[in-house]
Image: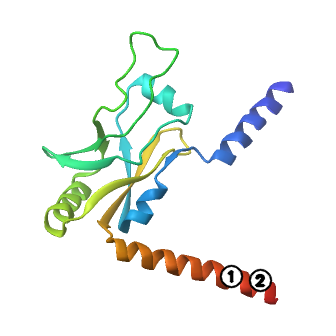
């Protein structure tokens, strides 16, 4: 009877977190997201254990198609403290798993359109597999960023006014 309660508590805790490891909130400010794509990622065992602690960072990372494969570059996954000499490098290139059709489409968009592939979220799916939500993005200029900020502020102010009115 006691085991069931503990398992239910663990499940509720994971449901609250939704498996989210890292979120790139800055990307939506710096880039205009044109399309999103979920991709798998090849990890070493200590990387997975380190991700479960939830201290990864993807703010300065990007994805790059090289030699017919897609690579996640500059993503920071800290060393797993309990693994001594079998630990991983913190900022190594990690292979992303996408279909050939999606890869060719992304390569076309990057080469022809001048777009960038950036990770938006790093999370564990319902089956416990690490996934990356990639965004096909176009860089924003400073005046575009200011315009977006004005719209966001106006919408926030408008909702406050409507809320106080009713």
Task: Give the labeled residue for mark 1.
Answer: 159
Query: Is residue 85 positioned above or below 95 on the image?
Result: above
Q: Quadrant of the N terminus?
A: top right
Q: Nearer the viewer, residue 27 or 13?
A: 27
Disc 2, SS: helix
Q: Quadrant of the C terminus?
A: bottom right
Q: Characterize the local packing of mark 2: few (<14), some (14-19) or many (20 or more) Cα atoms within 10 angstroms.
A: few
Q: Characterize the local packing of mark 1: few (<14), some (14-19) or many (20 or more) Cα atoms within 10 angstroms.
A: few
Query: Is residue 127 positioned above or below 50 on the image?
Result: below
Q: Residue at x 14, y 67 (%)?
A: 112
Which mark, by number, is residue 163?
2
Q: Nearer the viewer, residue 153 or 112?
A: 153
**Residue 34 locus on image (x, y percent):** 34, 70
Which mark, by number, is residue 53?
none
Query: Is residue 117 rendered to the left or right of residue 119?
Result: left
Q: Residue at x 73, y 86 (%)?
A: 161
**Residue 23 locus on image (x, y percent):** 50, 50
Q: CA distance from mark 1 to mark 2?
A: 6 Å
Q: Nearer the viewer, residue 94 or 153?
A: 153
Q: Among all residues in the image, which is located at the extreme right?
A: 1
Quick check: marks 1 and 2 in contact, CB under 8 Å?
yes
Query: Is residue 44 positioned above or below 138 on the image?
Result: above
Q: Residue at x 66, y 85 (%)?
A: 158
**Residue 81 locus on image (x, y percent):** 51, 18
Q: Among all residues in the image, which is located at the extreme bottom?
A: 165
């Amino acid at each position: 009877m006691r085991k069931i309660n503990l398992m239910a508590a663990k499940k509720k805790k994971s449901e609250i977190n939704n498996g989210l490891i890292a979120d790139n909130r800055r990307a939506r400010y710096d880039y205009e997201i044109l399309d999103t794509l979920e991709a798998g990622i090849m990890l070493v065992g200590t990387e997975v254990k380190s991700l479960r602690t939830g201290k990864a960072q993807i703010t300065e990372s990007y994805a790059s198609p090289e030699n017919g494969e897609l690579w996640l570059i500059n993503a920071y996954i800290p060393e797993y403290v309990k693994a001594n000499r079998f630990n991983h490098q913190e900022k190594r290139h990690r292979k992303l798993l996408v279909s050939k059709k999606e890869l060719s489409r992304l390569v076309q968009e990057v080469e022809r359109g001048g777009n960038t592939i950036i990770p938006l979220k790093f999370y564990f799916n319902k089956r416990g597999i690490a996934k990356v939500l990639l965004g096909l993005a176009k860089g924003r200029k400073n005046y575009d960023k200011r315009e977006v900020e004005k719209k966001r502020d106006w919408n926030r102010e408008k909702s406050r006014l409507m809320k106080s009115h009713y």
